[in-house]
């Protein structure tokens, strides 16, 4: 029996070595691309056009910030903030709280401004629960979640069963502030402007991310002065409602092969400056390519 097993075992080992050698050769033959080269290789169908009805335009003295709203994970919050925007609630409010490297928080800090059509409070939507596992483009687990990855252009995390999905606190996320009552979110929002405070995951409803203009939030004043109003918000509008702004935003499809190639390029940087590749990228360290096209407004006169 031993004489039969040993040759068979040797054959399996040799076959495995040959397969490994073939895999190594194949890997060596694959071109190593940088992240910028992967993005440049993306075809038109590797990008999705963001629905302008799900984009908020925040007009600030420092410039405009555009926010994509995450309707899939927090539909009630998305619906309510669009109502607030459309009734003009945010006109002449302010970004009244600025914590360096953490958040810029805005809205009606007094809580006295009249809400006309929107709900005064919104129930917590910390995560989406599904009966079946929800497919995402997976990265890896970390100390905050057993699964992380991407869903429709947003950095997300999941439980081990893939039946709870939530947007994670990376830099540039858009979320609703609340009091101790988890269902007390109302009109005050914040944008994270520093390293992602992941300890806030599943404690606050995150329902969007900055597509463009986070630098304008970073340029806001840190402390009030008597000379001028403190970080006034000129307006917050739904982009699809603005006739004078026909910006079209495109985000790389995070379930596309090219985005998966981009993940590989970010895990192992091939640019000449790098001397060590770690074969790893954190979910918040994986930028999601975004671009804007501006359609000129025709003058009919």
Image (cartoon, rainbow, N blue to C red):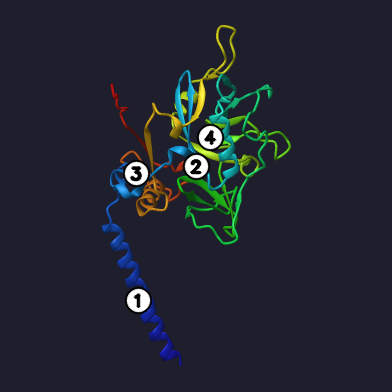
Image: 16 above or below 211: below
State yes or no: discs 4 and 2 in contact (Cβ < 8 Å).
yes
Name the residue that disc number 3 marks. 35
State yes or no: discs 4 and 3 in contact (Cβ < 8 Å).
no
Nearer to me, 239 or 101: 239
- Density class for disc 2 (Cα within 10 Å; few <14, some 14-19, many ≥20) is some
Looking at the image, which residue is at 50% across and 25% down? 217
State yes or no: discs 2 and 3 in contact (Cβ < 8 Å).
no
Q: CA distance from mark 2 to mark 1?
A: 42 Å
Query: Which mark sits nearer the N-terminus, 2 or 1?
Result: 1
As helix, strand or loop, the secondary structure at mark 2 comes to helix
Name the residue that disc number 2 marks. 284
As helix, strand or loop, the secondary structure at mark 1 comes to helix
Q: CA distance from mark 4 to mark 2?
A: 9 Å
Nearer to me, 280 or 44: 44
| 251 relative position to 158: left or right | left
Q: CA distance from mark 3 to mark 1?
A: 37 Å
Query: Which mark sits nearer the N-terminus, 4 or 1?
Result: 1
Looking at the image, which residue is at 68% across and 24% down? 111
Please tell me whether mark 3 or mark 1 is closer to you in this view.
Answer: 3
| 298 relative position to 55: left or right | left
Name the residue that disc number 4 marks. 195
State yes or no: discs 2 and 1 in contact (Cβ < 8 Å).
no
Name the residue that disc number 1 marks. 14
Residue 78: percent from left, percent from top = 56, 39
- The quarter of the picture where the C terminus appears is top left
Q: CA distance from mark 2 to mark 3?
A: 16 Å
Looking at the image, which residue is at 36% across and 43% down? 275
């Amino acid at each position: 029996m031993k004489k039969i097993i040993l040759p068979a075992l040797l054959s399996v080992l040799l076959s495995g070595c040959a397969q490994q050698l073939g895999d190594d050769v194949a890997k060596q033959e694959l071109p190593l691309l940088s992240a910028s080269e992967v993005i440049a290789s993306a075809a038109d169908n590797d990008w999705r056009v963001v629905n302008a009805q799900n984009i908020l335009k925040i007009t600030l003295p420092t410039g405009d910030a555009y926010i994509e709203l995450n309707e899939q994970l927090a539909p009630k919050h998305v619906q309510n903030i669009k109502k607030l925007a459309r009734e003009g609630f945010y006109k002449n409010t302010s970004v009244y709280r600025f914590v360096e490297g953490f958040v810029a928080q805005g809205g009606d800090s007094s809580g006295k401004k009249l809400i006309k059509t929107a709900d005064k409070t919104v129930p917590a939507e910390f995560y989406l629960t599904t009966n079946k596992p929800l497919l995402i483009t997976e990265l890896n687990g970390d100390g905050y979640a057993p699964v992380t990855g991407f869903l429709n252009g947003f950095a997300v995390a999941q439980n081990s069963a893939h039946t709870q999905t939530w947007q994670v606190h990376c830099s540039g996320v858009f979320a609703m502030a609340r009091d101790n009552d988890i269902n007390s979110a109302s009109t005050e929002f914040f944008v994270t402007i520093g390293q992602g405070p992941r300890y806030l995951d599943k404690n606050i409803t995150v329902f969007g991310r900055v597509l463009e203009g986070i630098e304008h939030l970073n340029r806001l004043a840190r402390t009030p002065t008597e000379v001028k109003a403190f970080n006034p918000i000129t307006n917050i509008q739904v982009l699809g409602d603005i006739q004078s702004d026909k910006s079209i935003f495109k985000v790389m499809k995070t379930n596309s092969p090219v985005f998966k190639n981009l993940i590989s390029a970010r895990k192992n940087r091939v640019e000449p400056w790098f001397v060590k590749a770690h074969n790893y990228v954190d979910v918040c360290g994986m930028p999601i390519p975004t671009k804007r096209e501006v359609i000129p407004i025709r003058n009919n006169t």
